[in-house]
Image (cartoon, rainbow, N blue to C red):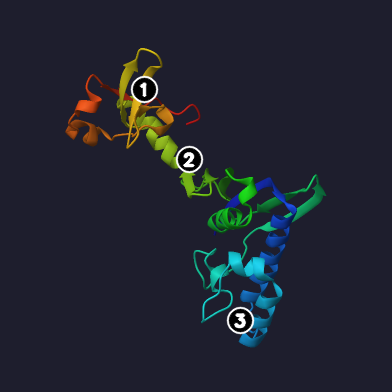
């Protein structure tokens, strides 16, 4: 029998108020993971966590901690599968360290996005491991967290794209580009028109093949997106 592990360890700086909120979440997670606690005690404990906690994790009529359960992919297992350690406060900030060998990637990402907005954008990497040398059991990935969303990536995805890129330069998509006499290359984005590459629309090969050049795009040509600097 072999055991697989998802490991991660990282630190981020948060405000004192955010660190306090993380502490409250840890306490609350212990509460909702204990099914023997009666509902009237849960109501009291929820009220004790204060209005800032209630604003961040709004309740429903069914449960005072229903908002907190949104952090977890499976509400039947509301556990923080990692350790959280708090450093000293320095210039109003606290360094918080997350670590674990059965790391709850999605829970940690949700928790940081909800409770530590001052640290965003933020990301961390994780590794998958196995106590036996079995094929397919190793790899890793990353999580990129912003106020607008959470992006997950896996090393196997990047490996597949790197191999595919060797035979197809358009695997990362195409952009419409035009040369501006003052600014050099400009790239088509919607709805803003030609501008920075960062704001460009990336077309798949199939989309590019079907796209009809509009009058606003007259003179533009297709350019394959370059491979990422950090594949």
Query: Is residue 77 something that shows in the picture?
Result: no
Q: Residues within 10 Å of mark 1 (few under 14, many from 20)?
A: some
Q: CA distance from mark 3 to mark 1?
A: 58 Å
Mark 1, residue position: 186
Which element carries disc 3, helix, strand or loop? loop
Q: Secondary structure at mark 2?
A: helix
Residue at the disc numbered 3:
35
Sequence-first tag of 2 and 1: 2
| Near-viewer residue (36 or 2) | 36
Check the image and report above or below for 168 versus 152. Answer: above
Instruction: Tell me the SS state at disc 1.
Output: strand
Q: Position of residue 155 (x, y in %)?
A: 48, 40
Query: Which residue is pictured at 26% across the width and 21% down the height?
Result: 220
The numbered dot on residue 46 is none
The image shows residue 37 at horizontal and vertical percentages of 65, 84
Q: Is 127 situated above or below 158?
A: below
Q: For the view shown, which residue lies furthest in the top direction?
A: 181
Mark sitting earlier along the chain (3/1): 3
**Whole-number angstrom distance, CA of label 2 to CA of label 3:** 38 Å
Instruction: Say above or below: 26 vs 126.
Output: below
Q: Where is residue 161 drawn, in percent x and y?
A: 38, 34
């Amino acid at each position: 029998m072999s055991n697989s592990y998802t490991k991660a360890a990282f630190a981020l700086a948060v405000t004192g108020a955010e660190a306090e909120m993380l502490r409250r979440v840890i306490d609350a997670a212990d509460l909702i993971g204990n099914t023997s606690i009666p509902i009237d005690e849960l109501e009291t404990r929820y009220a004790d966590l204060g209005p800032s906690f209630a604003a961040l994790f709004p309740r429903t009529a069914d449960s005072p901690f229903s908002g907190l359960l949104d952090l977890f992919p499976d509400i039947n297992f509301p556990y923080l599968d990692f350790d959280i350690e708090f450093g000293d406060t320095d210039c109003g900030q606290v360094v918080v360290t997350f670590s674990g060998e059965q790391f709850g990637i999605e829970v940690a990402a949700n928790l940081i996005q909800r409770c530590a907005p001052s640290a965003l954008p933020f990301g961390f990497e994780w590794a998958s491991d196995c106590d036996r040398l079995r094929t397919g059991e190793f790899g890793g990935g990353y999580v990129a967290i912003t106020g607008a969303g959470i992006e997950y990536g896996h090393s196997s995805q990047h490996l597949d794209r790197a191999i595919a890129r060797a035979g197809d330069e358009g695997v990362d998509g195409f952009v419409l580009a035009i040369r501006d006499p003052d600014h050099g290359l400009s790239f088509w984005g919607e709805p803003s028109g030609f501008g920075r590459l960062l704001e460009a629309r990336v077309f798949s090969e199939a989309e590019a093949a079907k796209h009809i050049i509009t009058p606003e795009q007259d003179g533009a040509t297709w350019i394959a997106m370059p491979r990422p600097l950090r594949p």
